Image: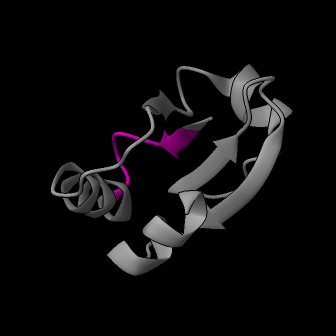
Amino acid sequence: MKILKFEASWCGPCKSMTKLMEGMQIPIPVERIDVDENMELAKTFGIRGVPTLVLVDGNGKEVRRITGSTTKEHIESLYS
């Protein structure tokens, strides 16, 4: 399992989420994906807004998703 964190350099809420997540001890890998640089992957996952967190299983299949700014507790609920 891992979290795909779809973001953009121009996105204020993305920067806030990055700071929040850096202060957390997330027990699974988090892969940051810039939607402007990885448009195909964003399209594959149907990303329509950033920030978006997508929990994927070992085969890369989506398990859960959170779109928009959120709380530490909501992020923790993504993978627990």
Picture residue at 58% right of the left edge, 55% below the top: 52
- Range shown magenta: 3-11
Q: Quadrant of the C terminus?
A: bottom right
- Does the magenta portion include 9? yes
- The image position of residue 57, as x and y in percent, is 74, 35
| Position in image of residue 62 (x %, y %) | 80, 44
* Residue located 40% across and 79% down the image: 73
Q: In this picture, is 46 found above or below 60?
A: below
Give the vertical position of 66 relative to 79 (above or below). below
Residue at image position (35%, 65%) is 13
Query: For the N terminus, which image quadrant?
Result: top right
Is residue 10 in view? yes
At a point 57% along the width and 53% down the height, the residue shown is 53
Observer-nearest of 28 and 35 = 28
> In the image, residue 69 lies at what x, y percent?
44, 72
Return the x and y of residue 44 as percentages of the image width and height.
Answer: 84, 31
Please give the count of numbered marks on the rendered protein. Answer: 0
> Can residue 50 be seen in this snapshot?
no
Q: Quadrant of residue 72?
A: bottom left
In this rendered view, identify the residue nearer to me: 62 or 58: 58
